Image: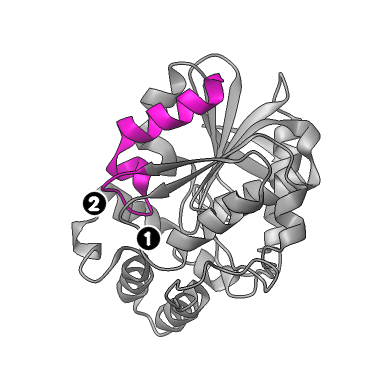
Amino acid sequence: MQSFRVNGYDMAYLEVGEGPPLVCVHGTLGDFRTWYSVLGPLSKSHRVISVSLRHFFPEHWDAVGDDYKMAQHVADTIAFIEQVKPGPVDLMGHSRGGHIAFRVAQARPDLLRKLVLAEPGGDLDASLPVPEGTPAHPPLAARTARSVEMIRAGDLEGALRNFYEGIEGDGSWRRVPAAAKQQLRDNALTFLGQINEQRRPYTLRDAQAIRTPTLLIGGGATSGSLSVMWRVLAAHIAGAETAVIANAGHWMFEQAPLEFGEVVNRFLAK
């Protein structure tokens, strides 16, 4: 584990492999351990740099303060990438980390060579309508709010199960490996910050502003809004490529690491 001093904060990261830098950004309840399953495949041709965002493990945050904001995490990621040499870097984000990576590409395309978004999280505004006939999906923000209530009531395990099963389906929590569950537990209090993180919805103008060569990846078994959002964004990001990891859900890189690594490596090698 190493760290860069970023905007007054020690931002921890793991670095594996040699070659051009690939910076990886985790999602909700994640940290630099999120990418463990694909460090092997990805580090064969890249120097993989897996970061932990502000207030995530190895920090044990007490949820005090008002700097858990989407804008803060985007600014931190930009400042982090500015310290990675040589540049520009490849950037990959998953879920909430995909949203962060999208905003970095929007704000500082000069820092990036290529962009990989694995089921980026967030909401679409009215300028990015979903295809006609798409089933209505309850926003994940409602699940987060419910998990926050449960944490405040002392039910940490219930909060994590509620969030995870809202994405992967009823009964999926019991199938999560012990190490992955521990990672989620280690970051559970970040839920309390996320409830007021001030995340803006994606707009058509936002999507059209992305000029970095982009790959969007989805899990073939993912359901709900996360299965729709990346496809809508891909339709409006110029030249975007897409890939589906068959028989995998939202945490596709854990469920099918070899297939995920192959898709990412193929795109980055072009």
In the rendered view of the protein, which quadrant contains the C terminus? top right
Of the residues under marks 2 and 1, which one precedes in the sequence? Answer: 2
* Magenta stretch prevailing secondary structure: helix
Residue extending furthest toward the front: 132
Q: Is residue 107 above or below residue 139?
A: above
Instruction: Tell me: 74 left or right of 108.
Output: left
- On whether residue 253 falls in the magenta region, the answer is yes
Q: Which residue occupies 79% across, 41% down?
A: 108
Q: Secondary structure at mark 1?
A: helix
Q: Tell me if residue 8 can be seen.
A: no
**Image marks 2 and 1: residues in contact by CB distance under 8 Å:** no
Which mark, by number, is residue 185?
A: 1
Q: Secondary structure at mark 2?
A: helix
Residue type indicated by callout 1: Arg
Which stretch is magenta? 245-270
Query: Which image quarter: residue 175?
Result: bottom left
Instruction: Tell me: 141 left or right of 237.
Output: left
Q: Nearer the viewer, residue 150 or 209?
A: 209
Q: Which residue occupies 56% across, 14% down?
A: 19
Dot 2: few (<14), some (14–19), or many (≥20) neighbours within 10 Å? few
Q: Which residue occupies 70% across, 69% down?
A: 127
Dot 1: few (<14), some (14–19), or many (≥20) neighbours within 10 Å? some
Instruction: Tell me: 221 left or right of 205.
Output: left
Which mark, by number, is residue 178?
A: 2
Q: Position of residue 52 (x, y in %)?
A: 55, 45
Q: CA distance from mark 2 to mark 1?
A: 10 Å
Q: Nearer the viewer, residue 161 or 247?
A: 247
- On whether residue 240 falls in the magenta region, the answer is no
Residue type indicated by callout 2: Ala
Query: Which image quarter: residue 79?
Result: top right
Q: Position of residue 39 (x, y in %)?
A: 41, 29
